[in-house]
Image (spheres, rainbow, N blue to C red):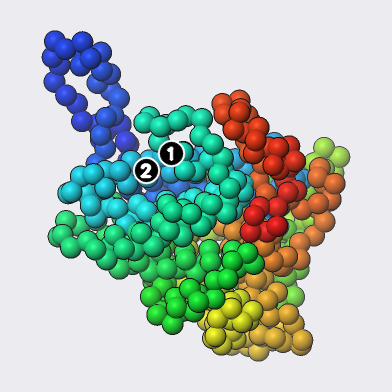
């Protein structure tokens, strides 16, 4: 369902109290919010996280995944990940929104009239925590998100514990579903810009996330029975109408951020040679939905650039390379902030079936995923697409590589996911970049930001030591 998102200001939500002669009341800042309605905070968390991570996914995640490359200000594209420039620092996005979501969760658990928010808040906590730890590995979690009442220097927790322990990712998904199923009051869920208050849709969202993250840890944990049960029950996102998304608009301030920035920032990002070759080799018509023919083309051709050039010594003519399509600037109403989609779930199930983790027909699931992904990107599926190079197991292809490649293509704008799945599986095969600042090694984790070393030094030092001095080449737990 298309949803128009309106900006809100948390500062307008404060409750003020009358002044008294009491010293504490007199010295309370009346302009500081002491309580926020969960409906307004839920809207803020979903929108802020989705908008920020969509921008990050374009300007940083897509570089790591080699969907596109940067012409200048590109130390990040050269894998100097400790030097974020136009993007590449998602850490504060996660922690700001996890903190605010924790406020919703505590209100829901302590105020009866807000109980309807407990399930969605637990599910969002699991969703954001999974994204955080999948990027960075061990992170502050169990002591984090509540600096007012708890510690402001939380310990780093093992990724394995964040996934598997009580109040961790998988447990919170189960608890979120249980809270929704136990809810019997008539007070509606308001501020929900993902599902318009539909609690059944939140359950499908949670089950889709369970499928995704059980598969992600399947090299470490036997997840066959749980995945098979989820597949057999079928209560997960199965169509694009059920996707966990919200739509950008064509007008400020709710258009995609690259439409609001100066043209020079937008023109800094062009088609990657990796993406070009994969799309051209598959005769994939989505190339025209995702990119533009380069300006110097004489026949509507597309041209990509190898990632990670040394911009200080390499002269590049913008007219020789393909920019992102109009959907990313002139007509962003066709873009979504993507939390999880039906095609992503189908590809996850197809991989599980191809690996015999579940009993299901991998080809059917693969074909479903491809069809849904074309629909998602507003591109007509050519009648011969699934009979040509993209056909399942065509010409002796590796089915796992095919599944992951199709998932990778569709994850444009959600590029961190493409990079995470590459780290987990090695597919699709990425290129050695042009002028690497990481010894020609593709990174396998994001580094902890510099502010952690400054503000949480003791705990940071333990985590840094466990990752070879905060190295981007040390794999996370599920990838060891």
Instruction: Identify residue for label 2.
Output: 102
Above or below: residue 445 compared with residue 421: above
Residue receiving disc 1: 145
Residue 224 versus residue 307 in the image, above or below: below
Q: Residue at x 32, y 57 (%)?
A: 119
Q: Position of residue 268 (x, y in %)?
A: 67, 46
Disc 2 and disc 1 in contact, CB within 8 angstroms: yes
x, y percentage for residue 94?
49, 44
Task: Tell me which residue sits at (66%, 85%) in the image.
Answer: 392
Dot 2: element: helix
| Residue 269 in the figure: left or right of residue 140 | right
Q: Is residue 172 left or right of residue 215?
A: left
Residue 90 sits in quarter: top right
- Percent across and percent down for residue 421 are 64, 62
Quadrant in the picture for residue 35: top left
Q: Can the viewer see residue 63?
A: no
Give the crowd class for mark 1: few <14, some 14-19, many >=20 residues within 10 Å: many
336 versus 287 height, above or below: above
The secondary element bearing badge 1 is classed as loop
How many residues crowd around disc 2 within 10 Å: few (fewer than 14), some, or many (20 or more)? some
Which of the two discs, 2 and 1, labels the residue nearer the N terminus?
Answer: 2
Q: Work out whether 97 lies above or below 331.
A: above
The residue sitting at 28% across, 62% down in the picture is 180
Residue 29 is marked as: none
Residue 365 appears in view = yes
């Amino acid at each position: 369902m298309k949803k128009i998102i309106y900006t809100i200001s948390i500062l307008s939500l404060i409750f003020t109290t009358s002044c008294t002669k009491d010293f504490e009341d007199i010295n309370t800042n009346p302009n500081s919010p002491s309580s926020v309605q969960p409906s307004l905070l839920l809207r803020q968390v979903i929108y802020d996280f989705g908008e920020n991570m969509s921008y990050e996914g374009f300007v940083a995640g897509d570089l790591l995944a080699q969907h596109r490359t940067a012409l200048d200000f590109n130390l990040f594209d050269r894998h100097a990940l400790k030097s974020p420039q136009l993007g590449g620092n998602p850490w504060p996005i996660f922690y700001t929104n996890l903190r605010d979501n924790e406020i919703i969760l505590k209100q829901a658990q302590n105020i009866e009239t807000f109980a309807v928010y407990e399930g969605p808040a637990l599910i969002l906590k699991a969703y954001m925590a999974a994204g955080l730890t999948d990027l960075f590995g061990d992170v502050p979690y169990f002591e984090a998100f509540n600096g007012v009442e708890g510690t402001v220097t939380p310990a780093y927790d093992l990724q394995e514990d964040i996934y598997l322990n009580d109040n961790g990712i998988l447990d919170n998904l189960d608890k979120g579903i249980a809270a929704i199923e136990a809810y019997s009051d008539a007070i509606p869920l308001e501020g929900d810009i993902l599902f318009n208050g539909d609690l059944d849709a939140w359950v499908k969202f949670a089950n889709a996330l369970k499928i995704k993250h059980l598969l992600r840890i399947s090299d470490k944990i036997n997840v066959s029975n749980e995945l098979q049960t989820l597949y057999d029950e079928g209560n997960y996102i199965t169509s694009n109408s059920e996707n966990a998304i919200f739509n950008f608009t064509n007008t400020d301030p709710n258009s995609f951020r690259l439409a609001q920035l100066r043209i020079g920032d937008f023109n800094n990002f062009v088609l990657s040679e990796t993406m070009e070759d994969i799309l051209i080799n598959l005769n994939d018509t989505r190339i025209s939905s995702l990119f533009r023919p380069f300006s110097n083309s004489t026949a509507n051709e597309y041209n990509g650039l190898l990632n990670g050039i040394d911009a200080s010594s390499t002269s590049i003519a913008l007219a020789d390379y393909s920019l992102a399509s109009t959907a990313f600037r002139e007509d962003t109403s066709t873009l979504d902030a993507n939390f999880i989609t039906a095609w992503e779930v189908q590809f996850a199930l197809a991989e599980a079936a191809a690996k015999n983790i579940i009993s299901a027909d991998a080809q059917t699931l693969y074909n479903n995923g491809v069809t849904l992904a074309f629909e998602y990107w507003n591109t007509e599926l050519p009648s011969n697409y699934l009979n040509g190079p993209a056909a399942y197991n065509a010409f002796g292809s590796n089915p796992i590589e095919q599944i992951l490649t199709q998932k990778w293509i569709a994850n444009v704008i959600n590029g961190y996911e493409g990079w995470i799945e590459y780290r987990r599986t090695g597919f699709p095969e990425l290129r050695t970049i042009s002028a690497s600042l990481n010894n020609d090694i593709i990174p396998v984790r994001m580094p902890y930001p510099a502010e952690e070393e400054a503000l949480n030094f003791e705990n940071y030092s333990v985590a840094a030591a466990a990752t070879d001095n905060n190295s981007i080449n040390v794999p996370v737990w599920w990838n060891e």
